[in-house]
Amino acid sequence: MKKVSVIGDGGWGTALALLLRSKGNEVTIWGNFPDYVAQQREKRENVKFLPGIEIPENINYTADLAEAAEGAELFVCAVPTQFIRGVFENFAAHYPKGVPVVSVAKGVERKTVKRCTEIISELLDGPPVAALSGPSHAEEVARAVPTAVVVASADVELARELQDTFMLKTFRVYTQDDIVGVELGGALKNVIALAAGMCDGLGYGDNTKSALLSRGLVEMSRLGVAAGAKRLTFTGLSGIGDLITTSFSPHGRNRAVGEKIGRGTDLRTILESTEKVAEGVWTTISARELAGKLGVTVPITEQIHEVLFEGKEPGQAVVDLMTRGKKREIEDLE
């Protein structure tokens, strides 16, 4: 059994803390806001991000990074992507060198277009890193609903160790060595999920969403391969698996944001109405920047960017996608 510190007290961090504690690990959850950390410690519930789930007394809470770091044998980074840099700049002074860090965030940093493990590696001076991703809503994992995910690392032994650490009869873990593909799959599917939600908000049907997801997967794969990923990774749990879940589920934050936009609500109003983070909003900016840097065509991402940040009507974005120049279906995969 291990002493594990989960950095980030959102719904996903809390769900994984519950899973790890159920396996007998000593678990501490770190949160950035002392008052909310104290509330969770007292009420034994994450009211904002995982309501209705009881948190056992034997899960520890802290708002002190030094306390979270002390004696830890594994760190789980559950901080939203755009906040990782700020948190880990402060964490670096307390990080015990050589302790593995597994990222469970799903995004790409704005401006730097770095993946989560790249940010962590930069700030902690090259720690052992891995990424855990897949179709895994926190609400279901916390209730022990059968779930399968993948953990990826360039260090195959670390991936296998983490597979043992996280695996339960209700939480099946596969291993991968394509950390680039696993991280980009988890990030880019959020952009496509925004588009899926817009389709729902516009009142379109199954035909539209199926076409969107099929072509969205092509776009994800194309950009991922250009960034150094393996194409087949996008046919797995962190690619199509996660894409399906987040594009259809009522738990999907990105799909929900897209649906509201499709119904006519502006992005600022949506974001101001919730504390939950829809990673796809900011990943749309990062994905577009990454595609430009690599010279990759990403028509769906371009249209979503125009809708989110340039005032384009979602219905017009669909028209523009449908009336693009003629293509062979498979040419984008060759």
Image (cartoon, rainbow, N blue to C red):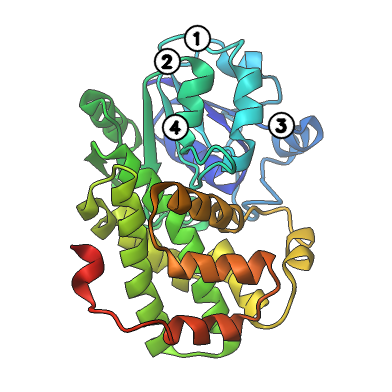
Query: Does residue 44 appear left or right of residue 203 in this picture?
Result: right
Residue at the image point whose x is 63% and y is 55% from the top: 52
Tell me if I can see residue 174 in this picture. Answer: yes
The residue where tag 1 is placed is 96
Please state which of residues 70 and 58 is positioned toward the viewer in this rendering: 70
Please state which of residues 44 and 191 is positioned toward the viewer in this rendering: 191
Callout 4 amino acid: Thr
C-alpha separation, residue under disc 3 versus residue under disc 4 = 20 Å
Tell me, for residue 32, which label it has, or none.
Answer: 3
The residue where tag 2 is placed is 99
Q: Earlier in the sequence, mark 3 or mark 4?
A: 3
* Label 2 packing within 10 angstroms: few (<14), some (14-19), many (20+): some
Secondary structure of the residue carrying numbered label 3: loop
* Label 1 packing within 10 angstroms: few (<14), some (14-19), many (20+): some
Q: Nearer the viewer, mark 4 or mark 1?
A: 4
Q: Tags 3 and 4 in contact by the CB under 8 Å rule?
A: no
Tell me if I can see residue 21 in this picture. Answer: no
Q: Position of residue 81 (x, y in %)?
A: 57, 41
Check the image and report above or below for 136 versus 118: below
Callout 3 amino acid: Asn
Residue at the image point whose x is 68% and y is 68% from the top: 310
Q: Nearer the viewer, mark 2 or mark 4?
A: 4
> Count the marks: how many?
4
C-alpha separation, residue under disc 1 versus residue under disc 3 = 20 Å
Tell me, for residue 117, which label it has, or none.
Answer: 4
Q: Nearer the viewer, mark 3 or mark 4?
A: 4
Q: Position of residue 226 (x, y in %)?
A: 31, 48
Callout 2 amino acid: Val
